[in-house]
Image (cartoon, rainbow, N blue to C red):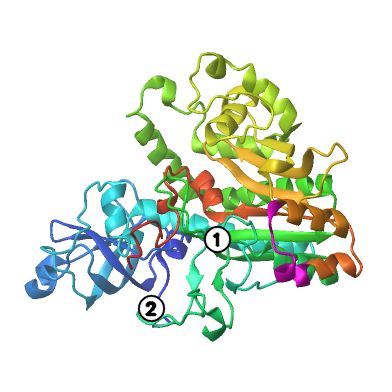
Amino acid sequence: MSKRIKIKALLESNETNIDVTVKGWVRTFRNNQFIALNDGSTNNNVQVVVDFENTDAALLKRITTGAALSITGTVVESIGKGQKIDIKAKEIEILGDSDPEKYPLQPKKHSLEFLREIAHLRFRTNTFGAIFRVRNSLSFAIHKFFQERGFVYLHTPVITASDAEGAGETFHVTNFDLDNIPRTDTNEIDYKQDFFGKATNLTVSGQLEGELGAMALSDIYTFGPTFRAENSNTTRHLAEFWMIEPEMAFYDLDDNMDLAEGLLKYVIKYALDNNREDIEFLTQRLQEEEKQKPQNERSEMSLLEKLQFCLDNDFVRLTYTEAIDILKDSTPNKKKKFQYLVEGWGTDLQSEHERYLVEKHFKKPVILTDYPKEIKAFYMRQNDDGKTVRAMDILFPGIGEIVGGSQREERLEKLEQRMDEMGIPKDELWWYLDTRRFGACPHAGFGLGFERLVLFVTGMGNIRDVIPFPRFPKNAEF
């Protein structure tokens, strides 16, 4: 097994007249002579030339699309177009057969809808090979960014008794026999008899626990799965998704924005530097897709141009109040083209409003700050005006909100007052309030939805296509 060379490494080396062993899956087999072999290390196949006249006919019959092969042969300069080298096969071993009558991925164009139904096989297509190599690079780059800056990677719990956002859209965790749930004298569920002795759920955010870490370690980040039981069947929502949540002691909102902008630029640049080939393929795929759209719905920039544009431009920073004024006076609002009209201050901005600001008005990524406290979470630091909080959202073209964060409220009395106003039980979050009792300091943090980042960098249109096995209402397949 150790003799094997990956196809990407082979194609990048200029050596010929050497013997190599490659292993992979058959993409196509033409004229009983040319195998296009792929091992997932790159979208590019290596062409294997078979001496079919001196090869067992029974073996040739088994070389079908999807079959796994081990091939040893000599690397030679290719005389065909489209590839620099070929492998002249000396030995061909079938590692796994693939029945062409039943294998669903034949060499033709498949719709993304069809591929979602066979998500266990879609990695084998060029599109999904490129997406998941880019996802891998972005994941690595996120760790690299924080590690280079001295952050501590903290694992926050997946099972928790708190709902950090106070939204109540959680998945419950229990080991009760659902046909025989114990109840109290007042017929309420008796959680004292449950595994953890209280009601628990899958986490919606690691932020609150992250803050505990930051109050001792200064700078921490989480990177893990989070869960929302929202009944949202949209192209932007998942029930299970990954979040990056840094929390930093001694940071204010400006520090927070600088870090978030720096992170986004760093990871986009890393993907461009390390996955150029995949991003070029995805750029081409998107251009083909956009040809089906009316001219006015097509992007002004290609995927590659859009990514480079984010690196070359500072993000525009403005307050929520300034944004509302722009939206109120905008043509789509005046002509009632927005689905949700912007009536005035206090409106909760929708994706269409965020995208208008980014794509039409500024034509740059935008950071909005200082939102009304009524539409934001309890833990955000209150401004002196009594109406707004030190929140910030980063808005990206094609996506809308990609990062949400804030300077956290470090003043105990202000935090308790806000929790009372919002009906959040202080006794359940006693441990969180302790960070404000013992050595409180200004601190800030944000959450970056990883799948939304991957969506942006790959140019895909549906969030279900950038996570290996999407979880959404009525779907937990694979």
Q: Residue at x 50, y 73 (%)?
A: 188
Question: In the image as oriented, which residue stretches furthest toward the front?
Answer: 185
Range shown magenta: 422-432
Q: Quadrant of the N terminus?
A: bottom left
Which badge, 1 or 2, comes first in the chain's sequence?
A: 2
What is the spatial separation of the Cα atoms under label 1 and label 2, in whole angstroms?
29 Å
Against 469, residue 360 (above or below) is: above
Residue 78: where, in percent of width, then height? 32, 54
Q: Quarter-wise, where is residue 394 in the image?
A: top right
Q: Residue at x 84, y 72 (%)?
A: 216
- Magenta stretch: includes residue 236: no
SS assignment at label 2: loop
Against 399, residue 347 (above or below) is: above
Tally of numbered discs: 2
Number of other residues with Cα within 10 Å of mark 1, as a class: few under 14, some 14 to 19, many 20 or more: some
Q: Is residue 397 left or right of residue 337?
A: right
Instruction: Return the residue at label 2.
Output: 178
Against 77, residue 321 (above or below) is: above
Q: Is residue 249 left or right of residue 468?
A: right
SS assignment at label 1: strand
Of 403 and 327, the residue lying toward us: 327
Q: Residue at x 17, y 68 (%)?
A: 63
Instruction: Return the residue at label 1.
Output: 242
Residue 458: where, in percent of width, then height? 48, 46
Question: In the image as oriented, which residue stretches furthest toward the left?
Answer: 57
